[in-house]
Image (tube, helix red, strand yellow):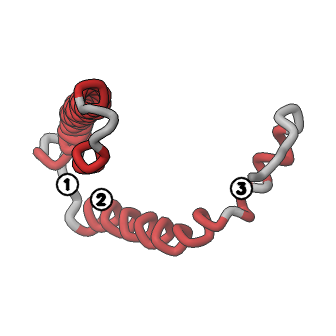
């Protein structure tokens, strides 16, 4: 566990560069950045998209789609948690019923009959 002083936030910001995750993701982040700059350059200078082109509305469409996808993920997460919680309740109920059954059988079986007790 990494221990740090929360009041020394400047050092914490500059220690991010030592992170393993950032170092592993840096080449892919750089590739995606360069690729997107190339696409924008081609759209603006080679194809020369006009102001009334449908391509200009793509950022708005992506904003709407990201909102819809975020709602979908929230609902799927809530559904998954509800299923997990229901399974947890049923597992707890099964454990409690098993314990109660064992206690009732132990109370009903004759203590002198060791073979029957061992069977149950």
Return the x and y of residue 109 as percentages of the image width and height.
24, 32
Cα distance between the residues tagged 3 and 1: 39 Å
Q: In the rendered image, which residue does mark 3 sit on?
A: 16
Q: Residue at x 72, y 62 (%)?
A: 17
**Disc number placed over residue 65 in the picture, else none:** none
Asked if the residue under mark 3 is in contact with the one under mark 2, i.e. CB atoms within 8 Å, the reply is no
- Mark 3 vs mark 1, foreground winner is 3
Return the x and y of residue 6 as percentages of the image width and height.
82, 34
Q: Is residue 49 above or below residue 85?
A: below
Asked if the residue under mark 2 is in contact with the one under mark 1, i.e. CB atoms within 8 Å, the reply is yes
Q: In the rendered image, which residue does mark 1 sit on?
A: 49
Q: Residue at x 30, y 59 (%)?
A: 44
Q: Going by the image, does 36 lie left or right of 77?
A: right
Q: Residue at x 85, y 47 (%)?
A: 11
Q: How many marks?
A: 3
Return the x and y of residue 10 as percentages of the image width and height.
84, 42
Q: Nearer the viewer, residue 58 or 86?
A: 86
Q: Is residue 25 above or below residue 10?
A: below
For marks 2 and 3 on the same chain, the one whose residue lies earlier in the sequence: 3
Q: In the rendered image, which residue does mark 2 sit on?
A: 44
Q: Nearer the viewer, residue 39 or 1?
A: 1
For the residue carrying disc 1, how many other residues have a C-alpha within 10 Å: few (<14), some (14-19), or many (20+)? some
For the residue carrying disc 2, how many other residues have a C-alpha within 10 Å: few (<14), some (14-19), or many (20+)? few
Which image quarter is the C terminus in?
top left
**Quadrant in the rendering for residue 92:** top left
For the residue carrying disc 3, how many other residues have a C-alpha within 10 Å: few (<14), some (14-19), or many (20+)? few
Cα distance between the residues tagged 1 and 2: 6 Å
Name the secondary structure under disc 2: helix
Cα distance between the residues tagged 2 and 3: 35 Å
Q: Nearer the viewer, residue 110 or 90?
A: 110
In the rendered image, is residue 64 in sight?
A: no
């Amino acid at each position: 566990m990494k221990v740090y002083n929360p009041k020394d936030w400047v050092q914490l910001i500059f220690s991010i560069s030592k992170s393993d995750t950032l170092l592993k993701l840096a080449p892919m982040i750089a590739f995606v950045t360069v690729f997107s700059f190339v696409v924008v350059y081609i759209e603006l200078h080679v194809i020369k998209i006009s102001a009334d082109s449908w391509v200009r509305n793509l950022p708005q469409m992506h904003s709407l789609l990201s909102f819809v996808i975020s709602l979908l993920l929230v609902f799927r997460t809530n559904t998954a948690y509800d299923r997990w919680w229901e399974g947890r309740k049923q597992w707890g109920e099964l454990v409690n019923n098993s314990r109660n059954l064992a206690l009732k059988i132990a109370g009903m079986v004759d203590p002198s009959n060791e073979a029957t007790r061992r069977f149950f």
